[in-house]
Image (cartoon, rainbow, N blue to C red):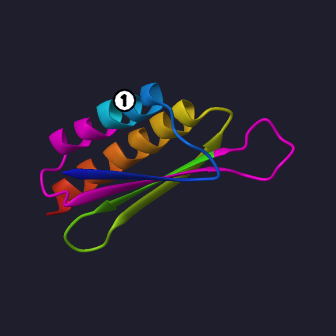
Amino acid sequence: MKISVQSIGLTPHAPLEEHIEKKLSKLDNYYDKIVECKVFLKVENKSDKENKTAEIILAVPGDDIVVKKTTTTFEESLDQCAEVAKKLLIKKKELA
């Protein structure tokens, strides 16, 4: 699975990129037909502390899986996205 990261308005540091790679590479264990994974990181223009948005788009045969979460840190947003994506992939595998 190819993982591409796009960040809007920021430059992701190495530990964040490693975190993305580690979290998302595990998704292959749940569904082996993932073609590509796109990650979008964005800081929302809110005054809230919860302004770090992570969006994951998984290209799979059929409909793509899109998960988007906003929390106080990118790591937390990514963890939540990965968890939801994992459940969706398991469900997709069961239906296949």
Q: Is residue 7 left or right of residue 60?
A: right
Q: Name the image quarter holding residue 86.
A: top left
State the SS at label 1. helix
Q: Residue at x 79, y 35 (%)?
A: 49
Residue appearing at x 40%, y 41% in the figure:
82
Q: Residue at x 36, y 29 (%)?
A: 18
Q: Count numbered badges in the picture.
A: 1
The type of residue carrying mark 1 is Glu
Residue 48: where, in percent of width, then height? 83, 41
Magenta stretch: residue 90 in it?
Answer: no
Residue sitting nearer the eye, 65 or 37: 37
Q: Indicate whether 66 appears above or below 22.
A: below
Q: Give coordinates of residue 16: x percent, y percent.
A: 46, 31
Query: Image quadrant for the C terminus?
Result: bottom left
Q: Which residue is mark 1?
A: 18
At a point 65% along the width and 52% down the height, the residue shown is: 9
* Quadrant of the rendered image containing residue 20: top left
Q: Nearer the viewer, residue 10 or 94?
A: 10
Q: Nearer the viewer, residue 15 or 58?
A: 15
Task: Residue 37: give x, y in percent of width and height.
Answer: 31, 55
Residue occupying the far top of the picture: 15
Left or right of residue 56: residue 30: left
Task: Say whether residue 79 is left or right of residue 70.
Answer: left
Magenta region includes residue 31: yes
In the image, which residues are magenta? 24-52
Give 5 or 72, whichever is nearer the viewer.
5
- In the image, farthest residue toward the bottom: 62
Residue 82 position (above or below residue 88) = above
